[in-house]
């Protein structure tokens, strides 16, 4: 399997960000890591291996990126609004640095898919909803989609609002909502087992997002797995191998 790694400048952040591509051709899939994760996390936890047949057959090409959670949502020393403001720098790194590299590397390969597990699921859903011109499918595994849940404090302003899908999606209407309905397709997966409720809040958060998407008339899927399915990599490998083939 072809593997290429590059470092991309990340203005406003504390270091360049890593992008690792796996495969030779196929629909581009942008992979976000779990909390504080790096680009190589997907490979180290067997997720690339779980998708090897799709990669080898040229159906997908994975583009795994760094998180910068240490500067944003995971930095509890700063207020919610400051975390959100810094997160906007991360968004710009993905859209202005990562996406152009993908477009140059995979011209004509189709709209981008996003995916991620745990905090990565938030990144995947949020980037799809806010940049539906770039990302049209998000496969979100065991996510929590409300940053106010993440040990936040302080006043909340515009940056906090526009980085919280539970807020800005609730306020979406008119032509913009119609456009989202025509463009995006989220897939929400979660288990009922260990760590999916406490401490992650993934199960209730996923059910809440499902209700909001339904209220807004946005087509999507909710896939709730059993009580034995925990917030862990072995199950995420099974879930991504189950869902991704339909989109490539």
Image (cartoon, rainbow, N blue to C red):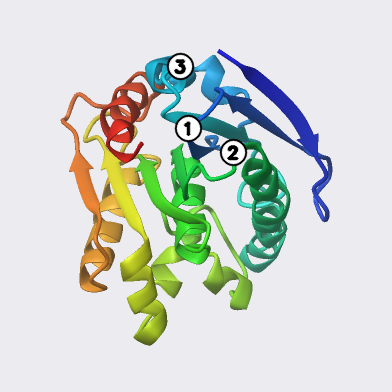
In the figure, is residue 237 to the left or right of 214? right
Residue 56's label in the rendered image is 3
In the figure, is residue 176 to the left or right of 160? left
Spatial CA distance of label 1 from label 3 is 9 Å
Spatial CA distance of label 3 from label 2 is 15 Å
Q: Which residue is mark 1?
A: 26
In the rendered image, which quarter is residue 174 located in? bottom left
Q: Is residue 65 above or below residue 162?
A: above
Residue 36's label in the rendered image is none
Q: Position of residue 231 (x, y in %)?
A: 35, 30
Spatial CA distance of label 2 from label 1 is 8 Å
Q: Nearer the viewer, residue 107 or 80?
A: 107
Local SS, label 1: loop
Residue contact at pointers 2 and 1, CB within 8 angstroms: yes
Residue found 19% across the figure and 40% down from its top: 224
In the figure, is residue 67 to the left or right of 226? right
Q: Which residue is mark 2?
A: 106
Q: Is residue 228 above or below residue 75?
A: above
Q: Is residue 144 visible?
A: no
Q: Earlier in the sequence, mark 3 or mark 2?
A: 3
Quadrant position of the N terminus in the picture: top right
Outermost residue to the front? 108
Q: Nearer the viewer, residue 150 or 60?
A: 60
Local SS, label 3: helix
């Amino acid at each position: 399997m072809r593997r290429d790694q590059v470092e991309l400048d990340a203005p406003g952040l504390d270091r360049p960000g890593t992008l690792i591509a796996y495969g030779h051709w196929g629909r581009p899939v942008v992979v976000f890591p779990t909390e504080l994760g790096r680009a190589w996390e997907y490979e180290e936890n067997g997720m690339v291996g779980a998708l090897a047949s799709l990669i080898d057959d040229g159906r997908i090409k994975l583009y795994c990126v760094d998180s910068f959670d240490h500067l944003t949502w995971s930095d509890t020393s700063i207020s919610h609004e400051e975390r959100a403001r810094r997160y906007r720098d991360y968004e710009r790194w993905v859209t202005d640095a990562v996406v152009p590299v993908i477009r140059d590397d995979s011209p004509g390969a189709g709209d981008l898919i996003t995916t991620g597990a745990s905090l990565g699921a938030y990144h995947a859903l949020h980037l799809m909803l806010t940049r539906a011109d770039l990302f049209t499918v998000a496969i979100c595994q065991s996510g929590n989609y409300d940053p106010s849940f993440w040990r936040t404090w302080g006043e909340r302003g515009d940056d906090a609002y526009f980085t919280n899908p539970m807020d800005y999606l609730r306020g979406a209407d008119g032509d913009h909502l119609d456009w989202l309905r025509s463009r995006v397709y989220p897939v929400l997966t979660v288990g009922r087992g260990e760590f999916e409720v406490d401490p992650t809040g993934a199960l209730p958060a996923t059910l809440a997002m499902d209700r909001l998407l339904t209220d807004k008339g946005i087509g999507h899927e909710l896939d709730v797995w059993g009580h034995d399915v925990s917030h862990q990599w072995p199950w995420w490998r099974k879930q991504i191998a189950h869902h991704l083939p339909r989109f490539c």
